[in-house]
Image: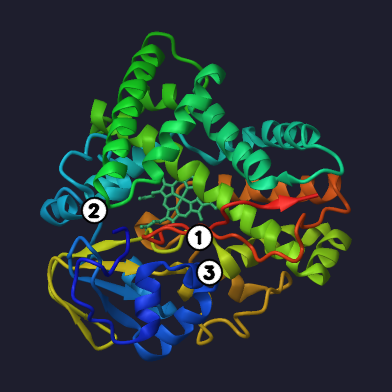
Amino acid sequence: TESWTVDAPRTFPTAAAEAAAQGCPAFRRDPHSVYAELREGAPVCPMRPPHGLETYLITRYEDARSALADPRLSKDMFGAMDSYRRIFGEDSTAMDDHMLNCDPPKHTRLRRLVGSTFTPRRVESLRPRVQQAAVTLLDACPQNAPVDLLESFAFALPVLVICDLLGIPTEDRAMVQGWSTTVARTGFDPRSREAGRRAEGELHRYFAGLISRKREHPGDDLLSALTRARDGSGRLSEQELLSTAWLLLFAGHKTTAYLIGNAVHHLLSHPAQLRLLRERPGLMESAVEELLRFDGSVESATFRYAAEDLTIAGTRIPKGALVQISLSSANRDPEKFEAPDRLDIERSGGAHAHLGFGHGIHYCLGAPLARMETQIALATLFDRFPRLSPAEPWAPARWLEVPFPAFRGLAALPVV
Ligand code: HEM
């Protein structure tokens, strides 16, 4: 029932499209060969997910890049409410009033207000804390015994950083992370939706309480700064503030956690590249860009609604349709990147044109923080554990299996 095909007629032009739509284990293990087929044979591919909304998947780099910046493709979920309700259910809007769900002029106002507090200076000021947290987490890992690095490090580090940034008290963090994980796992079946709604309700109440405490006793954190942020057009409304806190919490840790996991996995699977990185630590910046290109953590979470009829690469997309843009596929397009299936941390220039952080007005606001965290995480990990290796070198990597491939990430990363 979670599959993207069951409730709907099978209208896939290619077997590859069906595999992609189902998010089946074979696809999760190797989405890249499926995307290669789609780029070749059906670059704007019609799909039939269970919610029944007409959906198109874009897989080529140039199409993806222009779609991300195309004002005819809207992020305004309130404007597309009928479509939205069919996908996510009736009452999931309480924390959705944020910049990623709207178009200009509202987007411009929200991004400016949040950007005025989430500044490069604030990000840079986190550096010593990120470094210290990375060391502490790694020190706590057992020596010479298998450990799931995804849980104990790749997730733990970004959660700690985003909670610090937002000013979420230490004693509340496990609870907040639990709710956020439940929301992230919400699928299309009624039981999972019910659990998702309950967790959303808890998060909503929690953030409402936290924001009112920050108003009374402001701290040095981002949430306190957001309660005070104002410009010529006023302040963030209560609902916008709450939604922004949720957006930052959610966007700010899963994405980075999965990227760190993917990066460690691929470096361990490419020993020559890892050796090169150890010998030339100056390559870390370009390595992280290449890892974002090679197997970034945001896959198709970048959907938009067609605000009018339009044509992309010869395919007509009707007004109201859902358009999914596969960043994973765009980043392996041989028309853009030479030998795209080769991990090459020395790749320069071109690799930095990857779409791992999106493109256009919704380009990731947290990119500088995500880059800093990933660079510190990898440098500290490989420095601290020079003999790090997969705990089960014979076992295939366990990728997340989800019906809707929003994120690309591992389910676990056992290492010694
Ligand atoms: C937007 C990726 C980390 C905050 C986006 C988008 C992508 C992305 C692809 C654009 C979505 C679209 O156009 O539909 C990533 C990746 C990350 C990461 C791969 C980690 C490796 C973060 C962090 C934060 C953050 C750490 C904040 C703490 C945001 C926000 C937006 C956004 C606020 C919305 C921007 C807007 O709508 O104007 N991110 N992100 N992200 N990201 Fe990230």
| Colouring chosen for the image of the structure | rainbow
Q: CA distance from mark 3 to mark 1?
A: 16 Å
Q: For mark 1, give the secondary structure.
A: loop
Taking depth in this image into account, of 99 and 124 the one nearest to the observer is 99
Image quarter for residue 280?
A: bottom right
Q: In the image, is residue 416 above or below residue 142?
A: below
Instruction: Please say if the residues under marks 1 and 2 sit with CB atoms less than 8 Å apart.
Output: no
- Which residue is at a point 69% across and 51% down the rendered structure image? 375
Task: Look at label 1 and name its amino acid.
Answer: Arg
Q: For mark 2, give the secondary structure.
A: loop
- Which residue is at a point 42% across and 58% down the rendered structure image? 402
Query: How far from the left and from the top, in percent, is residue 147?
Result: 73, 44
For disc 3, the marked residue is: 354
Query: How far from the left and from the top, in percent, is residue 54?
Result: 18, 70
For disc 2, the marked residue is: 103
Q: Is residue 115 visible?
A: no
Query: How far from the left and from the top, in percent, is residue 56?
Result: 27, 74
Q: For mark 3, give the secondary structure.
A: loop
Relative side of 7 to 57, left or right? left
Q: Earlier in the sequence, mark 2 or mark 3?
A: 2
Task: Look at label 2 and name its amino acid.
Answer: Asp
Relative side of 224 to 308, left or right? right
Task: Look at label 3 and name its amino acid.
Answer: His
Q: Earlier in the sequence, mark 3 or mark 1?
A: 3
Instruction: Please say if the residues under marks 2 and 3 sit with CB atoms less than 8 Å apart.
Output: no
Q: In the image, is residue 225 above or below residue 252?
A: above
Q: In the image, is residue 353 above or below residue 382?
A: below
For disc 1, the marked residue is: 408
What crowding class fits label 3: few (fewer than 14 Cα within 10 Å), some (14-19), or many (20 or more)? Answer: many
Q: In the image, is residue 131 above or below residue 14?
A: above
Image quarter for residue 179?
A: top left
- Which residue is at a point 52% across and 20% down the rendered structure image? 220
